[in-house]
Image (spheres, rainbow, N blue to C red):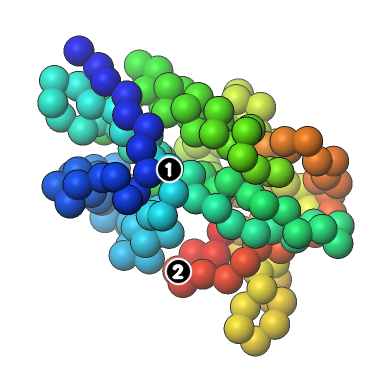
Amino acid sequence: MTDLWTVHTADLEAGVLTSARALLDDAFDGDFSDHDWENALGGMHTLVWESGELIGHASLVQRRLVHDGRVLRTGYIEAVAVRSDHRRRGHGDAMMDALERVLRKAYDLGALSASDEALEFYASRGWLLWRGTSSAMTPSGIEATKEDDGSIHVLPVGVTLDLDGEITCDWRSGDVW
Protein backbone atom coordinates (compact mmCIF):
# COMPACT_ATOMS: atom_id res chain seq x y z
CA MET A 1 0.00 0.00 0.00
CA THR A 2 1.30 3.44 -0.97
CA ASP A 3 0.54 6.54 1.09
CA LEU A 4 1.27 10.17 0.12
CA TRP A 5 1.66 12.83 2.80
CA THR A 6 1.71 16.58 2.21
CA VAL A 7 2.87 18.27 5.39
CA HIS A 8 4.80 21.31 6.63
CA THR A 9 8.28 20.88 8.09
CA ALA A 10 6.97 22.00 11.48
CA ASP A 11 4.63 19.01 11.60
CA LEU A 12 7.24 16.35 10.78
CA GLU A 13 8.66 14.30 13.63
CA ALA A 14 12.42 14.03 14.02
CA GLY A 15 12.41 10.38 12.91
CA VAL A 16 10.65 11.24 9.66
CA LEU A 17 13.12 14.03 8.97
CA THR A 18 16.00 11.63 9.65
CA SER A 19 14.49 9.10 7.22
CA ALA A 20 14.00 11.80 4.58
CA ARG A 21 17.60 12.97 4.89
CA ALA A 22 18.87 9.38 4.60
CA LEU A 23 16.73 8.84 1.49
CA LEU A 24 18.14 11.99 -0.11
CA ASP A 25 21.74 11.11 0.80
CA ASP A 26 21.27 7.73 -0.86
CA ALA A 27 19.39 9.05 -3.91
CA PHE A 28 22.04 11.70 -4.61
CA ASP A 29 24.93 9.25 -4.07
CA GLY A 30 26.33 11.23 -1.14
CA ASP A 31 26.23 14.52 -3.08
CA PHE A 32 23.50 16.01 -0.86
CA SER A 33 25.06 18.49 1.56
CA ASP A 34 23.91 19.89 4.89
CA HIS A 35 23.17 23.14 3.02
CA ASP A 36 21.02 21.23 0.51
CA TRP A 37 19.07 19.72 3.41
CA GLU A 38 18.64 23.07 5.15
CA ASN A 39 17.41 24.62 1.90
CA ALA A 40 14.71 21.91 1.68
CA LEU A 41 13.26 22.76 5.12
CA GLY A 42 10.74 25.36 6.24
CA GLY A 43 8.02 24.68 3.71
CA MET A 44 5.76 21.93 2.48
CA HIS A 45 6.96 18.36 1.94
CA THR A 46 5.47 15.49 0.04
CA LEU A 47 6.48 12.07 1.29
CA VAL A 48 5.66 8.74 -0.31
CA TRP A 49 5.44 5.72 1.95
CA GLU A 50 5.13 2.11 0.91
CA SER A 51 4.60 -0.63 3.49
CA GLY A 52 5.78 1.77 6.20
CA GLU A 53 9.02 2.70 4.42
CA LEU A 54 9.80 6.15 3.06
CA ILE A 55 10.43 5.83 -0.68
CA GLY A 56 10.01 9.42 -1.94
CA HIS A 57 10.52 13.04 -0.85
CA ALA A 58 10.09 16.50 -2.36
CA SER A 59 9.69 19.93 -0.80
CA LEU A 60 8.42 23.39 -1.70
CA VAL A 61 9.94 26.42 0.05
CA GLN A 62 9.26 30.12 -0.37
CA ARG A 63 11.87 32.28 -2.07
CA ARG A 64 12.01 35.68 -3.75
CA LEU A 65 13.11 35.93 -7.37
CA VAL A 66 13.50 39.14 -9.34
CA HIS A 67 12.59 39.35 -13.02
CA ASP A 68 11.87 42.33 -15.24
CA GLY A 69 11.96 44.73 -12.29
CA ARG A 70 9.45 42.70 -10.27
CA VAL A 71 9.96 40.76 -7.06
CA LEU A 72 8.08 37.48 -7.41
CA ARG A 73 6.89 35.33 -4.50
CA THR A 74 8.25 32.01 -5.65
CA GLY A 75 7.55 28.44 -4.64
CA TYR A 76 10.91 26.74 -5.07
CA ILE A 77 11.07 22.96 -5.48
CA GLU A 78 13.84 21.21 -3.55
CA ALA A 79 15.12 17.75 -2.69
CA VAL A 80 13.08 15.63 -5.12
CA ALA A 81 13.98 11.96 -4.96
CA VAL A 82 12.46 8.51 -5.20
CA ARG A 83 14.29 5.47 -3.89
CA SER A 84 16.03 3.76 -6.83
CA ASP A 85 14.08 0.50 -6.57
CA HIS A 86 10.74 2.39 -6.73
CA ARG A 87 11.38 4.72 -9.68
CA ARG A 88 9.27 4.92 -12.84
CA ARG A 89 6.07 4.04 -10.98
CA GLY A 90 4.50 7.51 -10.85
CA HIS A 91 5.72 8.49 -7.37
CA GLY A 92 7.59 11.56 -8.65
CA ASP A 93 4.50 12.70 -10.52
CA ALA A 94 2.33 12.20 -7.42
CA MET A 95 4.69 14.27 -5.27
CA MET A 96 4.91 17.02 -7.88
CA ASP A 97 1.10 17.05 -8.34
CA ALA A 98 0.71 17.77 -4.62
CA LEU A 99 3.38 20.49 -4.53
CA GLU A 100 2.23 22.11 -7.78
CA ARG A 101 -1.31 22.36 -6.35
CA VAL A 102 0.09 24.40 -3.44
CA LEU A 103 2.35 26.36 -5.78
CA ARG A 104 -0.50 27.38 -8.11
CA LYS A 105 -2.62 28.69 -5.24
CA ALA A 106 0.01 30.42 -3.13
CA TYR A 107 2.78 31.77 -5.40
CA ASP A 108 3.43 34.00 -8.41
CA LEU A 109 5.97 31.60 -9.86
CA GLY A 110 7.42 28.14 -9.45
CA ALA A 111 11.15 27.57 -9.91
CA LEU A 112 13.71 24.81 -9.52
CA SER A 113 17.17 23.78 -10.60
CA ALA A 114 17.16 20.37 -12.26
CA SER A 115 19.87 17.78 -12.70
CA ASP A 116 20.52 16.68 -16.27
CA GLU A 117 18.73 13.39 -15.54
CA ALA A 118 15.55 15.22 -14.48
CA LEU A 119 15.25 17.76 -17.34
CA GLU A 120 12.81 15.63 -19.34
CA PHE A 121 10.68 14.89 -16.27
CA TYR A 122 10.11 18.58 -15.49
CA ALA A 123 9.59 19.52 -19.13
CA SER A 124 6.89 16.83 -19.40
CA ARG A 125 5.08 18.52 -16.50
CA GLY A 126 5.04 21.93 -18.21
CA TRP A 127 8.06 23.46 -16.49
CA LEU A 128 9.90 25.82 -18.86
CA LEU A 129 13.66 25.98 -19.23
CA TRP A 130 15.04 29.42 -18.40
CA ARG A 131 17.06 30.40 -21.47
CA GLY A 132 18.30 33.74 -20.21
CA THR A 133 20.98 34.63 -17.70
CA SER A 134 20.82 33.99 -13.99
CA SER A 135 22.28 35.73 -10.98
CA ALA A 136 22.04 35.85 -7.19
CA MET A 137 21.72 38.70 -4.70
CA THR A 138 24.84 37.97 -2.66
CA PRO A 139 26.06 39.82 0.45
CA SER A 140 28.48 41.69 -1.84
CA GLY A 141 25.92 42.54 -4.54
CA ILE A 142 24.37 40.85 -7.55
CA GLU A 143 26.64 38.20 -9.06
CA ALA A 144 26.14 36.11 -12.20
CA THR A 145 25.51 32.38 -11.69
CA LYS A 146 26.57 31.15 -15.14
CA GLU A 147 27.17 27.63 -13.80
CA ASP A 148 23.40 27.35 -13.21
CA ASP A 149 22.33 28.57 -16.65
CA GLY A 150 20.64 25.71 -18.48
CA SER A 151 19.38 24.01 -15.31
CA ILE A 152 16.81 26.52 -14.05
CA HIS A 153 13.15 25.81 -14.78
CA VAL A 154 10.12 27.96 -14.07
CA LEU A 155 6.40 27.39 -13.88
CA PRO A 156 4.58 30.71 -14.41
CA VAL A 157 1.47 31.18 -12.29
CA GLY A 158 -0.32 34.31 -13.45
CA VAL A 159 2.83 36.18 -14.47
CA THR A 160 4.32 36.86 -17.87
CA LEU A 161 7.99 36.00 -18.17
CA ASP A 162 10.68 36.70 -20.74
CA LEU A 163 12.46 33.34 -20.69
CA ASP A 164 15.42 34.95 -22.48
CA GLY A 165 15.77 37.71 -19.89
CA GLU A 166 17.57 37.81 -16.58
CA ILE A 167 16.38 36.17 -13.38
CA THR A 168 17.90 36.79 -9.96
CA CYS A 169 17.43 34.69 -6.83
CA ASP A 170 17.71 35.60 -3.18
CA TRP A 171 20.83 34.59 -1.27
CA ARG A 172 21.20 31.42 0.76
CA SER A 173 24.02 29.17 1.89
CA GLY A 174 25.14 26.36 -0.39
CA ASP A 175 23.79 26.18 -3.92
CA VAL A 176 21.91 29.43 -4.54
CA TRP A 177 19.78 27.83 -7.26
* Mark 1: amino acid: Met
Which residue sits at x=69%, y=58%? Answer: 65
Q: Is residue 25 left or right of residue 134?
A: left
Q: Quadrant of residue 57?
A: top left
Q: Quadrant of residue 89?
A: top left
Tag in front: 2 or 1? 1
Q: Is residue 130 left or right of residue 99?
A: right
Q: Position of residue 113 (x, y in %)?
A: 56, 49
Q: Position of residue 133 (x, y in %)?
A: 76, 59
Label disc, if present, on residue 44 of the rendered structure: 1
User: Which quarter of the figure is the C terminus placed in?
Assistant: bottom right
Q: Work out which residue is located at the far front of the displayed protein and give it.
A: 11
**Which residue is tagged 2?**
174
Which residue sits at x=58%, y=37%? Answer: 103
Say which element carries label 2.
Answer: loop
Q: Is residue 32 visible?
A: yes
* Mark 2: amino acid: Gly
